[in-house]
Amino acid sequence: MIQEAASYFLQFKDLRIVDWLRETVEASQFDKFRSIIEKKSKEVKADPYFYCLFLFRSRQDEPLMEWLKTQRDFRMVMMMDEYLYPRFPEELTRLYELMAEDFLNQHIGRHAYVFMDELLQHLNKIKAGKIANKIALLIEMKFPHRSRMSDLV
């Protein structure tokens, strides 16, 4: 049954099968399912967001955090941060700092301001004020020449 479930999952990319298996089969059987999927990971990783959701729904927290670090995609991290922040506060804080610095080095003007404002609001909404404060400090220390950004601090 596990092999068939894995084949179905790989063919149809239906994440509901992951939820169903996680809730109904023994842990060893679910681990077998995850193992089969990982062997075919090239297919699953072709869509980074889908793979992110697979890791999340199959409760693979450490691989999920590692995946987010390799992808360095704000939207993907923002999708998972509320779940991961209590488990990996330091790692998530560092990832956000690195991504924010990269983003600000590559973007200027209104686009950068609006995105950083949105990010800080999101972080405060999920009660990750520590991360928001670190990003604000980053802006203040490394980007003092961007006067408009000081509104965010």
Image (tube, grey):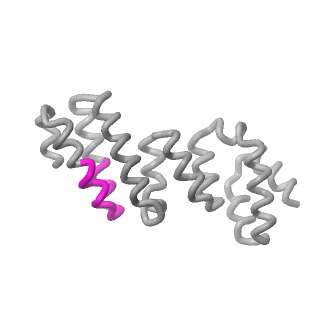
- How many numbered callouts? 0
Residue 130 included in the magenta stretch of the image? yes
- Asked if residue 19 is positioned above or below residue 63 in the image, the reply reads below
Does 96 lie within the magenta span? no
Q: Is residue 36 left or right of residue 1?
A: left
Q: Position of residue 30 (x, y in %)?
A: 76, 63
Residue ID at (52%, 40%): 70
Magenta stretch, main secondary structure class: helix
Q: Position of residue 130 (x, y in %)?
A: 29, 59
Which quarter of the image is occupied by the N terminus?
A: bottom right
Q: Which residues are magenta?
A: 119-135
Q: From the viewer's side, name the closer residue of 17 and 137.
A: 137
Residue 54 position within the rendered picture, expressed as x and y whole percent measured from the top left: 64, 52
Residue 34 location in percent, x, y?
Answer: 74, 55
Which residue: 79% across, 50% down? 36
Q: Is residue 106 left or right of residue 61?
A: left
The structure residue drawn at horizontal position 24% and vertical position 29%, both measured from the top left corner, is 108
- Residue 101: image quadrant is top left
Residue 132 relative to residue 99: left or right: left
Q: Residue at x 34, y 34 (%)?
A: 102
